[in-house]
């Protein structure tokens, strides 16, 4: 019983550490979802290296001691991830260049992942007669870990507390396996490290700031830092807003209210709730403020002074803790006079979902006939560069696709206003409206309106943004892509722009060349089974990434659910391997799994919309991956090419590594989800044809 349980707990520990590392790296790299793919690629490469190292090690207590290694390396690895920014001289909120992000990910995961990888061959040697069941036991433990994280740990315990739990659990398992009483005092070590680890992080990570509060939520890590008399609020290390910041709050309220002075019912999406104070200076009837993260609202409210808190509690104000896109989808038609997007630019897949044509159409339905949608994007001073033109222009063009009347501001403000009916941005009229309102402000002055809507500047911006033809959609997030190009410009990533530019053609050529070369190698060596395993490894990880990023685009909280999605994938892998245990026709099943992959990919284009479908798809992606690997192992066993079976695991990991890396940094952001799926279909179709043409590996 203890033998099986120890392997199950090995899987539980592994998935919990993978989820924690992925979430912490997401925070370090400002919530950029590319990190999911980079982390998976690094994880696979380093775990496979650990497995290779351990395959040459053979001693009695290796499996029991491996749990001690996990216990000792888990906590330092998480602390190292958290202090990477100051170690590499990057400040909070500063975007880390992609090459540095990849290097940092591999460095931070190296020792922990190699240690985790060593456990699998140790477990096989330990279980002896039950060795074939190791994969199933580990996958079952991984699924249990995913369930445990989502329904019990996420949002209740932070990364350091969960890692403390993993370390203590690992020492307990080691005690049971090794039966050494002298190991018992080691239980104090994780507790001591936990006590000092938090102080180390605060000392290095928040240097120059006073850490006021740090809380873990289901949607990210919330940190409040104080500099002099101002609080700065970060979510996943991405700056959200400062408080008090009356100048910014006045700007965000009085420009839109000058555009629509008769607006009575308002919807504000995200940002600082302190802005409500400025809107309540007008005779509004209702303000709905929507923020998905209840922890963020709770933390924000505790920062507000008595006056601002009283405005939040005004009977005209309603706070909603739910996804703003879902809120707008379910809102009554023709409900609002104005919707204000008070959120950052579409620099991540999560934020991009509020700048797509589909979202704008949903917002249009929630607006009254003369209602307005108001948003602001990153501004420039004096000149709009080519990549900023593309980034902001794609949003402008997407707005024009849905709304007949769209107007920008001058480049220094980055404002865009959209409506179904004509409206005026004449500076003289806006100034007259503001003066007539009688609203008292400390910083906002009427000349700002003249500056923001200068005829000459607005005409120039309109002409420049209007030249961008690309439309930002849920399935092809071009605004996210163009923000990556802008980011590459700022952080000396011209090599990335080489692939990002040219409508993705260069990236497609690169992928085609890589796969043509690899296919030629497999064909010349007549390794049909290895090619099937390689393409399935690529497919399984790439499709898992598509599932996660599509989930993020549709629902916006993959940070919370990645544990369940990953666990479900692992459960599918165990089920696929189990089904193939006693099957005597592996050659036919190899082709059957390729066909299943093609059907799954094709159906995802149509059905990947409802939440339950994401888990079903993740399960079957794992089922195909685990099943085909097991079928390939049976197909090669006992044949004249038996040595091929020993290399299948390496081939599978090589495909998975490329699938994670290339899909994350090139395919999805450049050609979009749909075309990436089509590319995977073509890949598996080639594999199926190759298997059908050659009966033997």
Image: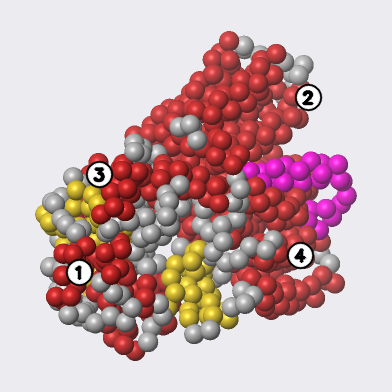
Q: Earlier in the sequence, mark 1 or mark 3?
A: 3
Q: Are marks 3 and 2 in contact (CB under 8 Å)?
A: no
The residue at which mark 2 appears reads as 643
Quadrant of the rendered image containing residue 613: top left
Q: Position of residue 513 (x, y in %)?
A: 61, 23
Give the foreground label among 1 and 2: 1
Q: Are marks 4 and 2 in contact (CB under 8 Å)?
A: no
How far is the residue under mark 1 from the one under mark 2?
A: 80 Å
User: In the rendered structure, does residue 43 fall within the stretch colored magenta?
Assistant: yes
Left or right, 250 with reference to 390: left
How far is the residue under mark 1 from the one under mark 3?
A: 26 Å
Label 1 crowd bin: few (<14), some (14–19), many (20+), radius 10 Å: some
Q: Earlier in the sequence, mark 3 or mark 2?
A: 3
User: What segment carries the magenta color?
Assistant: 40-66
The residue at which mark 3 appears reads as 400
Above-or-below relation of 682 to 674: above
Find residue 72 and name its label: 4
Q: Earlier in the sequence, mark 1 or mark 2?
A: 1
Above-or-below relation of 153 to 371: below
Left or right, 94 with reference to 266: right
Label 2 crowd bin: few (<14), some (14–19), many (20+), radius 10 Å: few
Find residue 431 and name its label: 1
Give the foreground label among 1 and 3: 1
How far is the residue under mark 4 from the one under mark 2?
A: 36 Å
């Amino acid at each position: 019983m203890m033998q099986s349980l120890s392997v199950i707990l090995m899987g539980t520990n592994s998935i919990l550490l993978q989820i924690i590392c992925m979430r912490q790296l997401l925070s370090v790299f400002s919530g950029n979802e590319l990190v999911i793919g980079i982390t998976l690629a690094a994880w696979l490469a380093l775990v496979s290296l650990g497995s290779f190292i351990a395959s040459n090690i053979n001693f009695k207590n290796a499996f029991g001691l491996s749990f001690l290694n996990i216990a000792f390396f888990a906590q330092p690895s998480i602390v190292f991830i958290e202090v990477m920014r100051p170690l590499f001289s990057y400040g909070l909120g500063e975007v880390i260049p992609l090459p540095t992000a990849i290097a940092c990910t591999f460095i931070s995961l190296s020792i922990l992942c190699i240690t985790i990888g060593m456990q699998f061959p140790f477990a096989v040697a330990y279980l002896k007669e039950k060795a074939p069941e190791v994969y199933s036991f580990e996958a079952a433990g991984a699924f249990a870990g995913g369930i445990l994280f989502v329904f019990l740990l996420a949002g209740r315990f932070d990364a350091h507390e969960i890692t403390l739990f993993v370390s203590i659990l690992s020492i307990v398992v080691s005690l049971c396996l090794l039966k050494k009483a002298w190991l018992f005092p080691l239980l104090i070590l994780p507790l001591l490290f936990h006590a000092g680890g938090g102080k180390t992080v605060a000392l290095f990570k928040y240097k120059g700031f006073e850490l006021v509060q740090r809380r873990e939520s289901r949607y990210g890590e919330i940190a409040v830092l104080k500099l002099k008399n101002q609080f700065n609020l970060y979510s996943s290390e991405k700056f959200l807003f400062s408080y008090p910041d009356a100048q910014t709050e006045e700007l965000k309220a009085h420009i839109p209210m000058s555009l629509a002075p008769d607006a009575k019912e308002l919807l504000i999406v995200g940002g600082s709730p302190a802005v409500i104070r400025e809107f309540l200076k007008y005779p509004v009837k209702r303000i709905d403020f929507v923020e998905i993260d209840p922890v963020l609202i709770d933390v924000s409210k505790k920062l507000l002074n008595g006056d601002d808190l009283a405005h939040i509690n005004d009977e005209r104000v309603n706070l909603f803790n739910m996804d703003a896109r879902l809120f707008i989808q379910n809102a009554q038609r023709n409900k609002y006079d104005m919707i204000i997007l008070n959120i950052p630019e579409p620099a991540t897949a999560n934020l991009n979902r509020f700048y797509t044509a589909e979202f704008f159409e949903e917002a249009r339905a929630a607006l009254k006939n003369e209602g307005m949608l108001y948003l602001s994007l990153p501004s420039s001073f004096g000149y709009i560069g080519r990549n900023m033109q593309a980034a902001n222009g794609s949003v402008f063009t997407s707005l024009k696709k849905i709304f007949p009347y769209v107007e920008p501001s001058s480049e220094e403000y980055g404002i865009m206003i959209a409506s179904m009916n004509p409206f005026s941005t004449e500076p003289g009229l806006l100034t007259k409206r503001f003066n007539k309102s009688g609203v008292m402000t400390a910083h906002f002055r009427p000349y700002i309106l003249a500056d923001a809507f200068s005829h000459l500047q607005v005409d120039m911006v309109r002409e420049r943004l209007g030249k961008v033809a690309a439309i930002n959609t849920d399935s092809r997030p071009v605004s996210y892509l163009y923000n990556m190009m802008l980011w590459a410009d700022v952080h000396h990533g011209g090599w990335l722009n080489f692939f990002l530019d040219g409508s993705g053609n260069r990236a497609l050529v690169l992928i085609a060349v890589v796969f043509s070369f690899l296919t030629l190698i497999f064909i010349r060596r007549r390794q049909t089974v290895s090619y099937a395993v390689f393409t399935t490894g690529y497919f399984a990880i790439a499709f898992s990434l598509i599932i996660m990023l599509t989930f993020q685009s549709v629902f916006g909280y993959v940070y919370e659910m990645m544990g369940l999605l990953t666990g479900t994938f692992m459960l599918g892998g165990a089920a696929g391997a189990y089904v193939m245990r006693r099957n005597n026709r592996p050659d036919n099943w190899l082709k059957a799994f390729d066909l299943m992959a093609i059907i799954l990919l094709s159906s995802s284009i149509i059905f990947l919309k409802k939440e339950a479908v994401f888990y079903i798809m993740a399960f079957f992606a794992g089922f195909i991956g685990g099943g085909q690997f097991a079928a390939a192992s049976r197909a090669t066993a006992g044949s004249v090419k038996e040595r091929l079976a020993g290399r299948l695991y390496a081939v599978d990991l090589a495909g998975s590594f490329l699938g994670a890396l290339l899909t994350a940094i090139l395919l999805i952001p450049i050609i979009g989800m749909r075309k990436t799926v089509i590319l995977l279909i073509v890949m598996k179709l080639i594999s199926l044809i190759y298997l059908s043409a050659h009966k033997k590996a």
